[in-house]
Image (cartoon, rainbow, N blue to C red):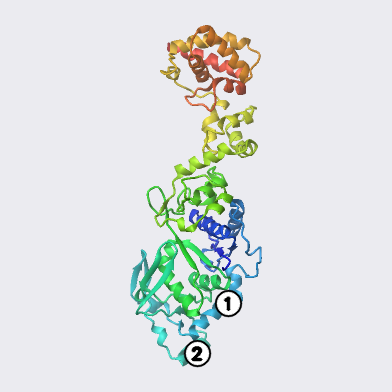
Amino acid sequence: MTKIRTRYAPSPTGKMHVGNLRSALYEFLIAKHAGGDFMLRIEDTDQERYVEGATEIIYRTLEKTGLVHDEGPDKDGGYGPYVQSERMKTGIYMKYAKELIDKGEAYYCFCDKERLASLRTEVVDGKEITVYDKHCLSLPKEEIEANLAAGKPFVIRQNNPKEGTTTFHDELYGDITVDNSQLDDMILIKSDGYPTYNFANVVDDHTMNITHVVRGNEYLSSSPKYVRLYDAFGWQVPVYIHLPLITDENHKKLSKRSGHASFEDLIDQGFITEAIVNYVALLGWSPEDNREIFSLDELIKEFDYHRISKSPAVFDIVKLRWMNGEYLKAMDFDKFYEMAEPYLKKAISKPLDLKKIAAMVKTRIEVFPDIAGLVDFFEELPEYDVAMYTHKKMKTTAESSLEVLKDLLPILEAQEDYSNDGLYQALVKYVEEKGCKNGYVMWPIRTAVSGKQMTPAGATEIMEVLGKEESLNRIRKGIELLKANV
């Protein structure tokens, strides 16, 4: 059996979109699941869209996500060069285009802009395209040679038949047949000598021994033209796997303008790499069981591309947040603290024990920016409504809370051990003497020291971090607030 070889072939045009990351991930998983090779090829022939620094983003993202390529511009596996502009300098694309011309499968086109502008147009996949009328196909050989000798600008077009049908096979969509009348004579070599994306793809995939081509299903409509090129050369057509569209929550295509459309956007929003990779793997693919949490190694083991769906995949940021939270809960504490520390320092400037605060929030956040809203009260007691002291379940009222705080103030002033355990014992002793439930006492104390309805920890854990002086000041403030309102 042929060794499986897949390739990730991005254009360096900016940040790595979630759709590109999914293509790279699926290509990686298909190769690695079968013990094959995963290759990186940079497709930089579209000079107008080239973005400075974008190639570095590609390398950085692949490294960070663990999608290690076996071959690429930095790892020659014998199929180089791996950058299209460098491949072009070898003359490979023009060589193969001329081979097609010799076979009658392509032809020189010398039409100028004015003539092309006068041709009829058709709407294909929502885009208006010019339908070329094969005018230059019938040019006499002498005229073609004279034009070339005179240096007249030209493109090279594919010669597609107008009669009959073309059928190609996709692993997910099955056999797809199209009428050849729908196939335009697409340009293979542009007037600047560069190959088009479509032509370079076919030549590169064949000459680099690529066995499986994975890409978005927006390329389904172009595939018959690719298949005709393979057949014209007499080459074996690779296995095609066209992936479903990724949409936002409103079922619109996930656009680059979306706030979470790229890998770097998500990292900036406090998501962790492992959770992003895990979530992106499930955008269109489902395992045999309903399991959702996978490491990259587990994905390699489980990934069967036949289980990729044809239906659009919805990018659900709420689901990704949940998954990220699961990863944070399971994360080693030292690693978590290292990642959480910048967010903690941004929210808290006082010399408090940030490690203890980190331990409080670890299981309560979904992304790192959630930290600020959970811990801001450590920095400063917020203004709060005394109505918070009244809690039906805890059976507390403003009056009962005032009584508890006044009773506890001298006890807490006399308390020397301000550890969580020491404080808890002091409060439980008071609870036993009073003959009430824990919440009846803990609720008013927690409200006084935090000024919040929801906190990442209990009253005594909060007081341990705040320290004696600050805790007592906040309880005194609580008493004053309650006195003014009771």
- The image quarter in which residue 360 lies: top right
Say which residue label 1 marks. Answer: 92
Residue 288 x, y percent position in the rendering: 47, 50
What amino acid is found at the position of numbered circle 1 in the picture?
Ile
- Nearer to us of marks 1 and 2 is 1
Q: Quadrant of residue 309?
A: bottom left
Counting labels gives 2
Q: Up-down: is 456 above or below 281?
A: above
Q: Quadrant of residue 135?
A: bottom left
In the picture as drawn, the residue positioned furthest to the bottom comes out as 142
Q: Nearer the viewer, residue 69 or 82?
A: 69
x, y percent for residue 465: 61, 24
Callout 1–callout 2 Cβ contact below 8 Å: no
In this rendering, position of residue 458 left or right of residue 127: right
Label 1 crowd (10 A; few <14 / some 14-19 / many >=20): some
Q: Earlier in the sequence, mark 1 or mark 2?
A: 1
Q: Please name the amino acid that badge 2 sits on.
A: Glu
Residue 450, image x, y percentages: 53, 22
Instruction: Classify mark 2: helix, strand or loop.
Output: helix
Q: Position of residue 481 (x, y in %)?
A: 48, 15
In terms of depth relative to the viewer, which is nearer, 286 or 352? Answer: 286
Q: Residue furthest front?
A: 1
* Closest to the observer, 115 or 133: 133
Residue on which the image places disc 2: 145
Q: Residues within 10 Å of mark 2 (few under 14, many from 20)?
A: few
In the image, 25 versus 450, the foreground residue is 25
